Structures are given as structure tokens and as C-alpha cells.
Image (cartoon, rainbow, N blue to C red):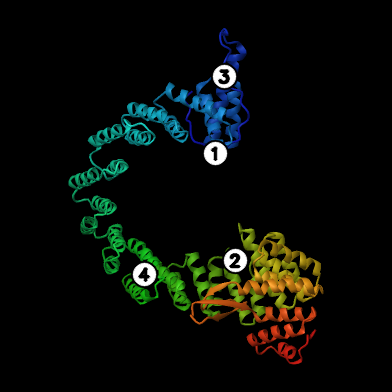
Amino acid sequence: MNPTLRILPVVLAVASIAIAAPPKGAKTLAPTWDDMAAKKKAEYVYLESQSAYALENYDDYALMARRAFALDSTDADIAAEMGMIILANSRADSLKRDWAYGALKRRFFSDPSDYLTGMVLANVAKRQRRFSDMVQVWETLDTVCTTLTQPGEELARAYLISYLNGDDSAYDKALRKYESLESGTGKTVNLSAEKIRAFAIKNDTASIVREVEELVHFAPSDPYVALFAGSNYQYLGDNQTALKYFDRACQLDSTNGQAFMAKAALYHQMGDSVGFDREVFLALRSPSLEVDSKLEILRGYVAELYQDPSQEKRIRELFSQLVAMHSGEPEIHSLYGAYLYEIKDYSGGAEQMGYSAALDPTNEGTWSDYVHMLGLAGDTAAVIKQSLDAMRRFPDNLYFPIMGADGYRMQGKVKEALEIANSVGTPENVKPSALSSFIAFKGDLLALSGDTISALKAYDQAIDIYPDNHMALNNAAYFMAENNIDLDKAERYISIAVRAENDNPTYLDTYAWVFFKKKDYNLARQYIDMTINLYNSQPHDAGESTDETEVIVDSDDEITEITPSSEIFEHAGDIYFMDGEPATAVDFWRKALALDPDNERLARKVQHQTYFYK
């Protein structure tokens, strides 16, 4: 047999294996006919296990490999295969793992030309800190596999690992091996990098400099060698020499974005913001630099500076110049849109995402960002229009019908919103969470339309599909509470959501409202207090707002606190009134009315200082 051993891609369960040596002094008996038949059968089963592995039927592979070992545990190939399975099982005990390692080791040294087995054995030896074995395996492979360079490179690394673990003689062996490799291949960046790592272990700066200069002398016109040299001088703290080599890399290859960015990064490290900006702008304005390289530089530059408001004008100008130079590149528009989104210029971001979507109409992610930013910009008509367009392009993405229908909802056109929602079938391979969210959204629309029965069915269906849809649980519970329908079920639904997210004030408010409807005013009061306290304890960035909160800007115009919505204040007033504290109730109603001054019901409550049932 000539097995091909491998590292298993899955952890395989291994049955207990009795591994025992024959008693000392026992006579070796001639094999019986049954023994020979078992060996032949073991060989057949073993070969079938290899076929199963090749077909990625790993369970069958493991079963057959164990069966082959049970039939003939003396075969070195089969034993090594069994050893591989044991070593792949992190739960195997130390005794089995030691036996498995020994089986693998015996198999390799019986045929040192088996490179793959040797590589696996060396890696296992390294993990198990058997460093002498690791070195021995790579020395053997380096001797046997003379046409390959990897064994020599790995051997040099193995020597360095041994040196770091106490073998003082191994360091010089590693250096001699690197010199031997270099004599065969000539100097290369990769090989010099390996040698420099070895020199760095001993902080041998002089050897690092000598190696870098020898490599530069060997390949003076290679821009990557110049870049490598600059990086090493930067590591050594010699920034001027590093700049010299980065300049050379840029001159040798004006399209090498990596060299431009390395130079800019060095200026940034030195605290030279002028030099940093200059190099970035030179690179991005270079007509010879590829667009992909520019995008790579631009991402790093924008990420570094976008949080500084004073840089906004400069970044906008830079994007404008790039758009003019590369007007047909959708990724530039997309990156510009992402930057504008980060600085909360949602209208500008939507405009750039629109350009990107027009240039590459097949990019689903760009369309999602486009519609999302239109919504943030408050352009409801555009949200509807572009969502309908995206629905035709990406019929399996439920985000677009939700956004389009929600646009109609915001315009008060619930019928049109339902028409969009009802026009969508069930896409193939849709995630349960996404489908649940879509059906729950339909439930919200049905609730708005007054179709109570259909709304409840939609909520139940959404929750059945994905029981962890906490928003669906919340909305269903609130709808049932508002309509005094099955309040026990409403309590059960919202309790699940609150247990999962006990710091979500929206869910706590619903919980309070369900208890209010059940006339348990004491519990209702406890939960509405928790709701208001959570809002008051959450700081937010100035200018940030949601449908359920109002931004209160402090004197520094930086840190703000958000207050509950008018609806939550009204709930608090109703609850406190029914719990016997009318004065506190009126205070809450006044706060609610301040946020919603056109609400006639609230005005009546404040004016008459009493609760109205209708």
C-alpha cells in the first residue's frame, strides 16, 4: 500500500482502540489462513476509506479506517491512518495521542520519501513541542527531496525554533542553511526576510543592515527590493534612509501604490502631517497609478482623517478630483458615499451611491446603501422609486419591498404599502430571520389598515418562523394590548422579548402597557419607571434622533440625553393616574403634550387633569 496521509478537515469521533504489544518472550506464530484473509480484507477496506475521503465522505472514511485497523493493526499504513484520526480528535487522551504519534513517526521513517506524511509529522511534532523530532524530519526531507526548496526553508525555521527553546547550537545551523539556500537560488526578498528575522532574534542590527544592502546591490532595479529595504530601515528607526528607499521604489515603479502608501505612512509615523498629506495627494492624483491602488490608499487616508471635522473640506476636494479623473469608476463614488454617510451628510451620500448604482447596476450592496441613505435623507418619494427598481433587479432581497412599502406608509398610503408587500412571494434560500421580519412588517401594515385578524395571523406566522424575532413579539403584544385581545398571550410574547433584551426601553414600555391593560397598575408602574430611567441613562451624540426619542442638546452641544417619546410619557401618565397619583400623572401628560402639541386627547387630559377612556 502507498497511503496518502493528511490533516483531517473535521474532528472525527474515535472509538476506543486497544493498543497492546505482544507479551515479552511470546513465540511468533505463522499466520493462519484467517489471519491472511483478515489482512487482505483490511487492505480492501483501507483502500475504500481512501476513496471515501477523496469524495469528502468523512464519516464513512472514519468508519472504514477504524474497521481496517480492527482487522489488521500491524499494517504500518493502516496504523498511521488511525494515528491521523486520533491526532485530529482534540478529545483523545494522552496515551492514545502518544501511540498515534508513534504510528505516524514509524510510517514516515519507513519511507522518508513520503513528503506529505513527513510534513504532517513535523507539524504535529512542533505542536507537541517535540523539537528534536521536528528537526529530524525536516533534515530527512531536505536530504531526500533535493529538488524542493521548502524542506530547506522549513529546516532553517526548525533550527531557529530549537534555538529559542534551548538548543544554542541550532542558531548557527539555521544561518548556514540560509546561506546554502541562497547559493542555489540567489538572493530573494523572501529569503532575506527569513535571514533578517533570524538576526532580529539576537538584535544583530549590523547583520540586518548588511543583508539589506547586499540584497539592494543584487537587485538595484527591483522596486519591491527598494520597498523592502525602506521597511527594514523604518523598523530600525532610520527614517531618512527609509525615505530614500521609498523614494527609489516610487521612482522605479510609479504605479506601485504600496510604495506610495509606505512613504505616506512613514511621514504619518514621524508626525509630519504636511508630508503625509502631500504623499497621499501625489499618489491619488497620479495618472499612472491604478485605480485599485488609489482606492486602497484612499480608504486608509479617509479612515485616518474622517473624524477630524477640519479635514472635511480637504477630503471632499480630493474625492471631487478623483471623480473627475475616474468618472466611470463606481467604487470611487461608493467610497465617497460611505464617507459622507459617516459624517451624516445623508443627501450627499445618497447622491454618490446613486452614481455608483448607475455605473454598476448589478451591485446589490450598493443598492441597499443607496436606498438606506435616501431614507435617512428623508426623501420618501425617492425611497419608493428606487426600492421598486431594486425589487425588479433583486427579487430575492426582502429589504427592498420593506423599504418601498415603508415609504408609502410614511406618506399615509397604507393600501399602496400593502400592495407592495403582497406582491412579494417567498424567495428561495431566504433566511428564516429575514422572512420573519418581512412577515412581521406585513403584520404592522395590516394592523394600520384595521385588519385585526390578518395582522394577528401575520405576527403569529412571523414568530413561528423565527421565535427569536423580538421586534415581532413586541409589536404583536402591543397591538393585542391596544385592542384588548388575548392579553395573556400578549404578556407571554412581550415577556420573551424583555428577557432577551432587558435593557430595551421600547420592550419595557410595551410590557408596562400590557400590565396596564390587564389592570395590574403596580407592575405597570414598575416597568414604565424602568423604561423612563433607561432613556435618561443613555447618552447620545448630538443630532442623533430616532422615531421614539427627542434629542436634548446640552450646553456644550456635544453630549446629549434623549427623553422618551410623547407616547411613552402619555403611557406613564395613564399608569400613574390609575395607580393613584394624579398629580404625577398630569406632569407626565404635560411632557407628552410638549412633544406632541397637536394631540387633542392629551390636551384634554392636561386641561381636565383626568384620564379619558376614549
- Residue 18: x %, y % from top left: 61, 23
Q: Earlier in the sequence, mark 3 or mark 2?
A: 3
Q: How far apart in space, not on screen, are marks 1 and 4 (Cα)?
A: 45 Å
Q: How far apart in space, not on screen, are marks 3 and 4 (Cα)?
A: 68 Å
Q: How far apart in space, not on screen, are marks 2 and 4 (Cα)?
A: 29 Å
**Is residue 236 shown left or right of residue 488?**
left
- Report which quarter residue 174 is drawn in: top left
What residue would you read off at disc 4? Answer: 328
In the rendered image, the vertical position of residue 87 relative to residue 217, given as above or below: above
In the rendered image, the vertical position of residue 96 relative to residue 524, given as above or below: above
In-front residue for pair 352/241: 241
What residue would you read off at disc 1? Answer: 56
Q: Residues within 10 Å of mark 1 (few under 14, many from 20)?
A: few
Q: How far apart in space, not on screen, are marks 3 and 2 (Cα)?
A: 59 Å
Q: Residues within 10 Å of mark 4 (few under 14, many from 20)?
A: some
What residue would you read off at disc 3? Answer: 40
